[in-house]
Image (cartoon, rainbow, N blue to C red):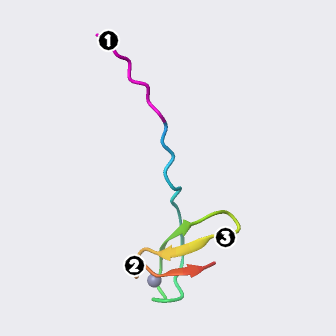
Amino acid sequence: MGRRKTQKIIRTTQRNSTIGRCPHCRTIGKIFLLGKPGQERCKCDKCRAEFDI
Ligand SMILES: [Zn+2]
């Protein structure tokens, strides 16, 4: 019993998701919020198109 493994909390890109309407495929579904605050981009889960809020 030697080493202690320290667990680092790795913060990957936050993938917040919301429910919204995609302007491309016009379906209401899950939409991911990407990018920095203020410059957020939305990505549709269904058609994978990116668009501005
Ligand atoms: Zn879509």
Q: Amino acid at mark 2?
A: Lys
Query: Distance of mark 3 from mark 1, alpha carbons?
Result: 47 Å
Neighbor class of circle 1 (other Cα within 10 Å; few <14, some 14-19, many 20+) is: few
Residue, disc 1: 2
Left or right: 44, with 4 as reference point? right
Q: Which mark is residue 46?
A: 2
Residue furthest toward the right?
A: 38
Q: Is mark 2 within 8 Å of ligand 1?
A: yes
Q: State the residue in front, 48 or 17.
A: 48
Taking the magenta stretch, the answer to whether it contains residue 5 is yes
Q: Contact (CB < 8 A) between labels 2 and 3?
A: no
First-in-chain label (2 vs 3): 3
Neighbor class of circle 2 (other Cα within 10 Å; few <14, some 14-19, many 20+) is: some
Q: Amino acid at mark 3?
A: Gln
Q: Which mark is residue 39?
A: 3
Local SS, label 2: loop
First-in-chain label (1 vs 2): 1
Taking the magenta stretch, the answer to whether it contains residue 48 is no
Tell me which residue sits at (52%, 83%) in the image. 22
Query: Distance of mark 2 from mark 3, alpha carbons?
Result: 22 Å
Q: Of the residues tagged 1 and 2, which is closer to the observer?
A: 1
Query: Distance of mark 1 from mark 2, alpha carbons?
Result: 48 Å
- Percent across and percent down for residue 32 are 51, 68
Local SS, label 3: loop
Q: Which mark is residue 28?
A: none
Neighbor class of circle 3 (other Cα within 10 Å; few <14, some 14-19, many 20+) is: few
From what the image shows, is residue 12 above or below residue 47?
A: above
Q: Identify the magenta region.
A: 1-8
